[in-house]
Amino acid sequence: MYDEALIELAAEADLQLRSNLAYHAPFLARSVDSWLEDMFGAASLAEVFTRIEAFPTLLIPWWLDGSIGERDRSLHRALTYSTMNGYLYIRLIDNLMDQDAPGDVNLLPALSFFHLEFIDPYRRLFGPGHRFWADLRSVWLETADVTLHDATLREIDRSTFERVSARKTGAAKIPVAAVCHYRRRLHLQPRWNDFADAFGRWHQMHNDIFSWRKDAAHGATTFLLSEGRRQLADGTIEDWFIDAGFDWGIDQLNAYMSDLKRIADTLEPQEALAYLGDRENSLTAQVAEVETGLAVLAGARNALDG
Amino acid sequence: MSDDRESKEELEAVIGKAAFDESFAEELVADPAAALRTMGIEPTDEMLEALSAIDAESLKRLAKAFEPQPGIG
């Protein structure tokens, strides 16, 4: 799924991030290390970014560049380092907003490092006044805007889900813009942006389904839980999820996957399409396991009702 | 409420919790009586017999599927 070359770049970026932070801000580095360990255990950032369930934020620009010609390793070294820092910037803010995830306000100064290191590789690639900066501004601020908007929602319907919740991963379009500008292939940008947006919808729906228990426990608002409240005649949200909610969620997920495949089919080379096949197979195995468990649960309840 | 109905409801609650709480599901597999007591339920022979008929491993895997996964999301 991930080329060895890209895994190596992710490992380099991980090392560079930690050594830059330790060199420039050693006290902060210790706090950030603890925070990363709380979130990811012993896994390296490279492992976390290249897991099958991760958003393919490193892969999308990789595929795009591969569609243009021979990949430029130095470009992807810069993009990978930037993306890792940009992700940690967003993740720290998300965790602090959620209040149920690792991280506390004492980590806020780390945002200075993450933001600087997210921007710095682009500063080296594009001069002041380059059109890339307008794309970055637009995408980065939209991501910030929808993140706050999503956190304030008390009800999410399909339209709000697609306009707001599913666009929280929109920053994945920044390295897309970078490749298109760097390679002077701006005509490719809309299609790859469409792919990133469509993947955002699938990914957020997947999160809605498989994090539903945590979301419900913390009173979070999601499309899935909002739909549950809309459909619920009596009983609990757990009853709805067991009886209908899981199937409803998987139906949405399959519809978003069909959209994704339609877009991926127009992209060359077809690495994106092959990746979607792998994600689909992984999901099929996950669904089978859940369906077995739900059948056992239904059987046990029926037996008790006797 | 009759005792019978009460224990059915208690067992439903136990099964529901096991389905979505991996550590509780593990406790239920390892030591059903102790797991019931953590919910404030005094196990009876009937309850333990009803629980032994359930495929607890499948419930455990179900709970695991909905546990938060560390990673980027």
Image: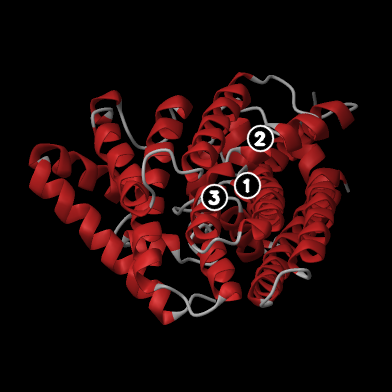
Instruction: Please state which of residues B29 and A198 is positioned toward the viewer in this rendering.
Output: A198
**Could you say which disc has been placed on residue A207 in the image?**
1
Residue B3: horizontal and vertical position, in percent? 75, 31
Residue A73 occupies quadrant: bottom left
**Could you say which disc has been placed on residue A165 in the image?**
2
Disc 2 to disc 1, how far (Cα)? 11 Å
* Residue under numbered circle 3: A172
Disc 2 marks a residue whose amino acid type is Ser
Between label 3 and label 2, give the one nearer the viewer: 3
Quadrant including the N terminus of chain A: bottom right
Residue at the spot 67% in from the left edge and 65% down from the top edge:
A286
**Which comes sooner in the sequence, label 3 or label 1?**
3
Residue at the spot 75% in from the left edge and 27% down from the top edge:
A156
The answer to whether marks 3 and 1 mark residues whose Cβ atoms lie closer than 8 Å is no
* Res. A277 visible in picture: yes
Disc 3 to disc 2, how far (Cα)? 15 Å
How packed is label 3: few (under 14 Cα within 10 Å), some, or many (20 or more)? many
Location of residue A128 with respect to A66 vertically, above or below: above
Chain letter, disc 2 residue: A
Residue A277: horizontal and vertical position, in percent? 71, 74
Chain letter, disc 1 residue: A
**Which comes sooner in the sequence, label 2 or label 1?**
2
Disc 1 marks a residue whose amino acid type is Asn
Snapshot colouring? secondary structure
Residue A66 occupies quadrant: bottom right
Instruction: Please state which of residues A15 and A40 is positioned toward the viewer in this rendering.
Output: A15
How packed is label 1: few (under 14 Cα within 10 Å), some, or many (20 or more)? some
Same-subunit check for callouts 3 and 1: yes
Disc 3 marks a residue whose amino acid type is Ala
Same-subunit check for callouts 3 and 2: yes
Q: Secondary structure at mark 1?
A: helix
Residue A231: horizontal and vertical position, in percent? 88, 31
